[in-house]
Amino acid sequence: MPWLERGIGMEAAVVKEGDWVLIYFSEKKSYVVRVEQGRQFHTTKGSIDLGSLVGVEYGSRLETNVGEEFYVTRPLIVDRLSVLKRFTQVIYPKDLAYLLLGSGVGPGSRVVEAGTGTGYLTSILAFYVRPSGRVFTYEAREDFYKMAVENFERIGLLPYITVRKRNIKEGIKERNVDAVFLDMPDPWEVFGEAYSVLNHGGTINVFTPTTGQMSRSIEGLKRAGFKRVEAAEIMYRRYKASPRELRPENVGIWHTGYIIRGQKL
Ligand SMILES: C[S@@+](CC[C@H](N)C(=O)[O-])C[C@H]1O[C@@H](n2cnc3c(N)ncnc32)[C@H](O)[C@@H]1O
Protein backbone atom coordinates (compact mmCIF):
# COMPACT_ATOMS: atom_id res chain seq x y z
CA MET A 1 0.00 0.00 0.00
CA PRO A 2 1.55 3.28 -1.07
CA TRP A 3 0.65 5.12 2.13
CA LEU A 4 2.67 2.59 4.13
CA GLU A 5 5.82 3.42 2.22
CA ARG A 6 5.77 7.02 3.39
CA GLY A 7 9.08 8.01 4.82
CA ILE A 8 11.01 4.99 3.62
CA GLY A 9 11.85 6.33 0.22
CA MET A 10 8.98 5.23 -2.01
CA GLU A 11 6.99 7.87 -3.87
CA ALA A 12 3.81 6.80 -5.64
CA ALA A 13 2.91 9.86 -7.72
CA VAL A 14 -0.70 9.03 -8.57
CA VAL A 15 -3.70 7.64 -6.74
CA LYS A 16 -4.44 3.98 -7.40
CA GLU A 17 -7.61 1.92 -6.91
CA GLY A 18 -7.69 0.70 -3.30
CA ASP A 19 -5.47 3.50 -1.92
CA TRP A 20 -6.53 5.20 1.31
CA VAL A 21 -6.34 8.93 0.68
CA LEU A 22 -6.81 12.08 2.72
CA ILE A 23 -9.53 14.38 1.36
CA TYR A 24 -8.72 17.83 2.74
CA PHE A 25 -11.23 20.71 2.65
CA SER A 26 -10.00 22.85 5.55
CA GLU A 27 -8.22 22.70 8.92
CA LYS A 28 -11.53 21.58 10.45
CA LYS A 29 -12.72 19.24 7.71
CA SER A 30 -10.81 16.31 6.27
CA TYR A 31 -11.62 12.65 5.67
CA VAL A 32 -9.71 9.42 5.16
CA VAL A 33 -11.40 7.35 2.43
CA ARG A 34 -10.59 4.36 0.27
CA VAL A 35 -10.57 4.92 -3.48
CA GLU A 36 -13.04 2.54 -5.14
CA GLN A 37 -14.63 2.56 -8.58
CA GLY A 38 -18.38 3.17 -8.53
CA ARG A 39 -18.49 4.64 -5.02
CA GLN A 40 -19.70 8.14 -4.18
CA PHE A 41 -18.41 9.83 -1.04
CA HIS A 42 -20.94 12.32 0.38
CA THR A 43 -19.83 15.29 2.46
CA THR A 44 -21.45 18.51 3.64
CA LYS A 45 -19.54 20.18 0.79
CA GLY A 46 -20.96 17.98 -1.93
CA SER A 47 -20.10 14.52 -3.20
CA ILE A 48 -16.97 13.03 -4.73
CA ASP A 49 -16.91 10.19 -7.26
CA LEU A 50 -14.11 8.14 -5.67
CA GLY A 51 -13.45 6.24 -8.90
CA SER A 52 -12.58 9.54 -10.58
CA LEU A 53 -9.60 9.92 -8.23
CA VAL A 54 -7.79 6.96 -9.83
CA GLY A 55 -4.83 8.31 -11.79
CA VAL A 56 -5.00 11.75 -10.17
CA GLU A 57 -1.65 13.09 -8.91
CA TYR A 58 -1.23 13.23 -5.14
CA GLY A 59 -1.42 16.85 -4.04
CA SER A 60 -4.02 17.76 -6.68
CA ARG A 61 -6.67 20.38 -6.01
CA LEU A 62 -10.09 19.16 -7.18
CA GLU A 63 -13.77 20.07 -6.81
CA THR A 64 -16.87 18.28 -5.51
CA ASN A 65 -20.04 18.08 -7.64
CA VAL A 66 -21.11 21.49 -6.25
CA GLY A 67 -17.77 23.18 -6.91
CA GLU A 68 -16.26 23.05 -3.41
CA GLU A 69 -12.45 22.75 -3.54
CA PHE A 70 -10.52 19.98 -1.84
CA TYR A 71 -7.04 18.46 -1.98
CA VAL A 72 -6.24 14.78 -2.29
CA THR A 73 -3.10 13.65 -0.48
CA ARG A 74 -1.60 10.83 1.57
CA PRO A 75 -2.86 10.30 5.13
CA LEU A 76 -0.39 10.14 8.03
CA ILE A 77 -0.45 6.98 10.15
CA VAL A 78 -2.26 8.93 12.86
CA ASP A 79 -4.98 9.89 10.31
CA ARG A 80 -5.25 6.26 9.30
CA LEU A 81 -6.32 5.22 12.80
CA SER A 82 -9.72 6.78 11.97
CA VAL A 83 -10.46 3.90 9.58
CA LEU A 84 -10.51 1.43 12.49
CA LYS A 85 -13.99 0.54 13.79
CA ARG A 86 -13.99 1.47 17.48
CA PHE A 87 -15.49 -1.02 19.91
CA THR A 88 -13.39 -0.40 23.05
CA GLN A 89 -11.73 2.54 24.73
CA VAL A 90 -8.58 3.36 22.74
CA ILE A 91 -5.20 4.92 23.51
CA TYR A 92 -4.96 8.48 22.16
CA PRO A 93 -2.08 9.80 20.05
CA LYS A 94 -0.51 11.85 22.87
CA ASP A 95 -0.11 8.66 24.92
CA LEU A 96 0.74 6.47 21.92
CA ALA A 97 3.66 8.75 21.08
CA TYR A 98 5.14 8.68 24.58
CA LEU A 99 4.54 4.93 24.94
CA LEU A 100 6.32 4.25 21.66
CA LEU A 101 9.34 6.49 22.13
CA GLY A 102 10.14 5.32 25.65
CA SER A 103 9.70 1.64 24.83
CA GLY A 104 12.74 1.38 22.57
CA VAL A 105 10.59 -0.19 19.83
CA GLY A 106 11.74 0.37 16.24
CA PRO A 107 12.13 -1.45 12.93
CA GLY A 108 12.73 -5.16 13.57
CA SER A 109 11.42 -5.25 17.15
CA ARG A 110 9.48 -8.23 18.49
CA VAL A 111 6.61 -6.90 20.58
CA VAL A 112 3.96 -8.56 22.76
CA GLU A 113 0.76 -6.68 23.61
CA ALA A 114 -2.50 -7.25 25.55
CA GLY A 115 -5.38 -6.61 25.18
CA THR A 116 -5.84 -5.87 21.54
CA GLY A 117 -9.22 -4.11 21.77
CA THR A 118 -9.85 -1.79 18.82
CA GLY A 119 -6.18 -1.97 17.90
CA TYR A 120 -4.98 1.64 18.00
CA LEU A 121 -1.83 0.73 19.92
CA THR A 122 -1.30 -2.46 17.88
CA SER A 123 -1.48 -0.49 14.63
CA ILE A 124 1.04 2.12 15.75
CA LEU A 125 3.40 -0.59 16.97
CA ALA A 126 3.05 -2.55 13.72
CA PHE A 127 3.73 0.56 11.66
CA TYR A 128 6.99 1.20 13.49
CA VAL A 129 8.32 -2.39 13.70
CA ARG A 130 8.00 -2.79 9.90
CA PRO A 131 9.35 -4.24 7.74
CA SER A 132 11.12 -7.03 9.64
CA GLY A 133 9.55 -6.81 13.11
CA ARG A 134 6.31 -8.26 14.44
CA VAL A 135 3.59 -7.51 16.97
CA PHE A 136 2.01 -10.44 18.83
CA THR A 137 -1.24 -9.17 20.29
CA TYR A 138 -3.51 -11.06 22.73
CA GLU A 139 -7.27 -10.58 22.94
CA ALA A 140 -9.35 -12.63 25.39
CA ARG A 141 -12.77 -12.00 23.82
CA GLU A 142 -13.72 -13.92 20.69
CA ASP A 143 -15.93 -11.12 19.26
CA PHE A 144 -13.25 -8.48 19.83
CA TYR A 145 -10.59 -10.76 18.35
CA LYS A 146 -12.60 -11.09 15.10
CA MET A 147 -13.28 -7.36 14.86
CA ALA A 148 -9.61 -6.56 15.54
CA VAL A 149 -8.46 -8.83 12.69
CA GLU A 150 -10.88 -7.02 10.35
CA ASN A 151 -9.52 -3.70 11.56
CA PHE A 152 -5.91 -4.72 10.83
CA GLU A 153 -6.91 -5.87 7.35
CA ARG A 154 -8.66 -2.54 6.77
CA ILE A 155 -5.67 -0.46 7.82
CA GLY A 156 -3.28 -2.68 5.84
CA LEU A 157 -1.03 -3.75 8.73
CA LEU A 158 -2.11 -7.38 9.23
CA PRO A 159 1.10 -8.72 7.56
CA TYR A 160 3.06 -7.43 10.58
CA ILE A 161 0.68 -8.64 13.30
CA THR A 162 -0.10 -12.02 14.86
CA VAL A 163 -3.47 -11.77 16.60
CA ARG A 164 -3.92 -14.39 19.32
CA LYS A 165 -7.38 -15.18 20.68
CA ARG A 166 -6.08 -15.91 24.14
CA ASN A 167 -6.12 -14.64 27.70
CA ILE A 168 -2.56 -13.47 28.24
CA LYS A 169 -2.76 -14.65 31.86
CA GLU A 170 -2.65 -18.21 30.48
CA GLY A 171 0.88 -17.55 29.29
CA ILE A 172 2.90 -15.70 26.64
CA LYS A 173 3.85 -17.93 23.72
CA GLU A 174 6.75 -15.81 22.44
CA ARG A 175 10.32 -15.67 23.72
CA ASN A 176 13.13 -13.15 23.06
CA VAL A 177 10.76 -10.23 23.14
CA ASP A 178 11.98 -6.60 22.95
CA ALA A 179 8.97 -4.93 24.56
CA VAL A 180 5.68 -5.79 26.26
CA PHE A 181 2.66 -3.44 26.28
CA LEU A 182 -0.31 -3.98 28.59
CA ASP A 183 -3.66 -2.15 28.41
CA MET A 184 -5.92 -4.38 30.50
CA PRO A 185 -7.62 -4.08 33.90
CA ASP A 186 -5.13 -6.18 35.91
CA PRO A 187 -1.73 -5.93 34.17
CA TRP A 188 0.21 -6.92 37.33
CA GLU A 189 -1.06 -10.48 36.85
CA VAL A 190 1.39 -10.93 33.96
CA PHE A 191 4.45 -8.95 35.12
CA GLY A 192 6.34 -12.10 36.17
CA GLU A 193 5.67 -13.84 32.85
CA ALA A 194 6.54 -10.67 30.92
CA TYR A 195 9.86 -10.42 32.76
CA SER A 196 10.78 -13.99 31.80
CA VAL A 197 10.10 -13.53 28.05
CA LEU A 198 11.82 -10.14 27.68
CA ASN A 199 15.35 -9.73 26.37
CA HIS A 200 17.81 -7.91 28.61
CA GLY A 201 17.27 -4.20 28.00
CA GLY A 202 13.66 -4.86 27.01
CA THR A 203 10.85 -2.72 28.40
CA ILE A 204 7.41 -3.24 29.87
CA ASN A 205 4.91 -0.48 29.14
CA VAL A 206 1.62 -0.26 31.00
CA PHE A 207 -1.34 2.00 30.24
CA THR A 208 -4.02 2.27 32.87
CA PRO A 209 -6.87 4.72 33.52
CA THR A 210 -6.97 4.99 37.33
CA THR A 211 -4.50 5.93 40.07
CA GLY A 212 -5.29 2.73 41.98
CA GLN A 213 -4.16 0.64 39.01
CA MET A 214 -1.10 2.86 38.62
CA SER A 215 -0.12 2.27 42.25
CA ARG A 216 -0.53 -1.51 41.97
CA SER A 217 1.43 -1.50 38.72
CA ILE A 218 4.41 0.34 40.22
CA GLU A 219 4.46 -2.04 43.16
CA GLY A 220 4.09 -5.08 40.91
CA LEU A 221 6.81 -4.05 38.47
CA LYS A 222 9.32 -3.60 41.30
CA ARG A 223 8.37 -6.91 42.86
CA ALA A 224 8.79 -8.69 39.50
CA GLY A 225 12.39 -7.41 39.25
CA PHE A 226 11.99 -4.52 36.79
CA LYS A 227 14.28 -1.51 37.26
CA ARG A 228 14.08 2.11 36.07
CA VAL A 229 10.40 2.07 36.99
CA GLU A 230 8.72 5.37 36.12
CA ALA A 231 5.16 6.66 36.07
CA ALA A 232 3.82 9.53 33.98
CA GLU A 233 0.73 11.34 32.82
CA ILE A 234 0.93 13.18 29.51
CA MET A 235 -0.64 16.64 29.55
CA TYR A 236 -1.55 17.84 26.08
CA ARG A 237 -2.91 21.27 25.29
CA ARG A 238 -3.90 22.21 21.74
CA TYR A 239 -3.80 25.79 20.55
CA LYS A 240 -5.82 27.49 17.84
CA ALA A 241 -3.32 27.65 15.00
CA SER A 242 -4.32 31.19 14.12
CA PRO A 243 -1.61 33.87 14.45
CA ARG A 244 -4.06 36.67 15.31
CA GLU A 245 -6.04 34.63 17.78
CA LEU A 246 -3.36 32.46 19.29
CA ARG A 247 -4.74 30.85 22.43
CA PRO A 248 -5.62 27.38 23.80
CA GLU A 249 -8.62 25.60 22.29
CA ASN A 250 -11.81 25.88 24.36
CA VAL A 251 -12.33 22.15 24.68
CA GLY A 252 -10.05 19.14 24.70
CA ILE A 253 -9.65 15.66 26.10
CA TRP A 254 -8.79 16.01 29.76
CA HIS A 255 -8.20 12.58 31.35
CA THR A 256 -6.99 9.57 29.39
CA GLY A 257 -4.69 7.44 31.55
CA TYR A 258 -1.31 6.83 33.14
CA ILE A 259 1.82 5.28 31.68
CA ILE A 260 4.02 3.10 33.85
CA ARG A 261 7.24 1.73 32.47
CA GLY A 262 10.03 -0.56 33.65
CA GLN A 263 13.09 -2.16 32.12
CA LYS A 264 14.67 -5.61 32.46
CA LEU A 265 18.35 -4.77 32.91
C1 LIG B 1 -9.08 -0.86 26.60
S1 LIG B 1 -9.04 -2.20 25.48
C2 LIG B 1 -7.50 -2.00 24.65
C3 LIG B 1 -7.48 -0.87 23.65
C4 LIG B 1 -6.23 -0.79 22.83
N1 LIG B 1 -5.06 -0.56 23.64
C5 LIG B 1 -6.33 0.29 21.75
O1 LIG B 1 -5.51 1.25 21.77
O2 LIG B 1 -7.21 0.19 20.88
C6 LIG B 1 -8.70 -3.58 26.55
C7 LIG B 1 -8.86 -4.92 25.86
O3 LIG B 1 -8.18 -5.90 26.64
C8 LIG B 1 -8.89 -7.10 26.55
N2 LIG B 1 -8.41 -7.90 27.70
C9 LIG B 1 -8.68 -7.67 29.02
N3 LIG B 1 -8.02 -8.58 29.79
C10 LIG B 1 -7.32 -9.38 28.92
C11 LIG B 1 -6.46 -10.50 29.10
N4 LIG B 1 -6.20 -10.99 30.32
N5 LIG B 1 -5.90 -11.09 28.01
C12 LIG B 1 -6.18 -10.60 26.76
N6 LIG B 1 -7.01 -9.56 26.54
C13 LIG B 1 -7.57 -8.95 27.60
C14 LIG B 1 -10.34 -6.66 26.58
O4 LIG B 1 -11.21 -7.66 26.07
C15 LIG B 1 -10.28 -5.42 25.72
O5 LIG B 1 -10.53 -5.73 24.38
Image (cartoon, rainbow, N blue to C red):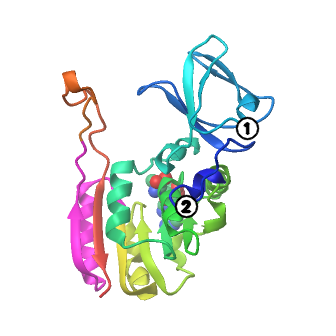
Q: Nearer the viewer, residue 204 or 237?
A: 237
* CA neighbours of label 1 inside 10 A, class few (<14), some (14 to 19), many (20+): few
In the rendered image, which quarter contains the N terminus?
bottom right
Residue 150 is inside the magenta segment: no
Q: Nearer the viewer, residue 20 or 85?
A: 20
Residue 187 x/y as whole percent: 38, 68
Q: Residue at label 1?
A: 55
Residue under the image location 63 percent in, 58 percent down: 145
Q: Confirm or deny contact between disc 2 and disc 1 (CB under 8 A).
A: no
Residue under the image location 22 percent in, 26 percent down: 243
Q: What amino acid is labelled 1 in the image?
A: Gly
Give the secondary structure at mark 2. Answer: loop
**View extreme (top): residue:** 66
Q: Quadrant of residue 130?
A: bottom right
Q: Is residue 55 above or below residue 198?
A: above
Q: Quadrant of residue 157?
A: bottom right
Q: What amino acid is labelled 2 in the image?
A: Gly
Residue 39 x/y as whole percent: 76, 28
Q: Nearer the viewer, residue 53 or 137?
A: 53
**Does residue 41 appear anywhere in the picture?**
yes
Give the secondary structure at mark 1. Answer: loop
Q: Is residue 101 above or below residue 178?
A: above
Question: Is residue 104 left or right of 3 when viewed as pictured?
Answer: left
Q: Which mark is residue 228?
A: none
Q: Is residue 15 above or below residue 158?
A: above
Q: Which mark is residue 9?
A: 2
Highlighted magenta segment, given as a residue range: 207-236
Mark 1 near ligand 1 (CB under 8 Å)? no
Residue 262 x/y as whole percent: 29, 76
**View extreme (right): residue:** 38
Residue 214 is inside the magenta segment: yes
